Structure formats: C-alpha cells, structure tokens
Image: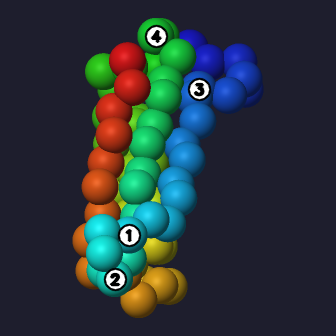
Amino acid sequence: MFNGAALGIVAWRRTSAGCTPYWNVGAQLRPEARGRGIGTATQHLLNDYLLAHSPVVRLEELLHR
C-alpha cells in the first residue's frame, strides 16, 4: 500500500481574535492517502496535544484538497 513515504503534512500556528488566542490547524494529504481516516486521526491527535499543552480554548481547522 504505502512504501514508507510521507502521506502528507499537518501544520499549525497560534493566532488570535482580539485578545483570545487560538490554534489554526491544517492538513494536506497525498491523493492516494485520502479517504482512509489518516488525516482525521492525525488532526485529532494534534488537537488533543495542543489543547493539553497550551492555554487556548479554540481550534480552527482548515482542509486542503
């Protein structure tokens, strides 16, 4: 199925709306990796990590196709 090559990328940056900080999270997958739940699982893990290790109360997700 996959030969060990990267399946995509996930990126995040801290931003704010006024004085309320939040994380902007995005993911991009190679076409052959889409539709298998890989991106969803990756973003869930990243979201859990960011919420557990930072004082923000909001996440904003962007999906790139």
Please tell me how many numbered marks the rendered image carries: 4
**Quadrant that contains the C terminus:** top left
| Upstream in sequence: badge 4 or badge 2 | 2
The amino acid beneath tag 3 is Leu
From the image, tell me which residue sits under label 3: 7
| Upstream in sequence: badge 4 or badge 3 | 3
Gap between marks 1 and 2 measured at Cα = 6 Å
From the image, tell me which residue sits under label 1: 16
| Upstream in sequence: badge 3 or badge 2 | 3
Residue visible at 47% across and 73% down?
49
Gap between marks 4 and 2 measured at Cα = 38 Å
- Residue 26: image x %, image y %? 43, 42
Residue visible at 52% across and 16% down?
30
**Quadrant that contains the N terminus:** top right
Closer to viewer: mark 4 or mark 1: 1
Q: Residues within 10 Å of mark 2 (few under 14, many from 20)?
A: few
Q: Is residue 33 above or below residue 14?
A: above
Of residue 39 and residue 15, the one placed in the foreground of this image is 15
Judged left or right of residue 62, residue 53 is right
**Residue 48 seen in this snapshot:** no
- Residue 37: image x %, image y %? 32, 34
Gap between marks 4 and 3 measured at Cα = 9 Å
The amino acid beneath tag 4 is Pro
Name the quadrant containing residue 4: top right
Gap between marks 3 and 2 measured at Cα = 36 Å
**Residue 17 seen in this snapshot:** yes
Contact flag, marks 1 and 2 (Cβ < 8 Å):
yes
Closer to viewer: mark 1 or mark 3: 1
From the image, tell me which residue sits under label 4: 31
Q: Residues within 10 Å of mark 4 (few under 14, many from 20)?
A: few
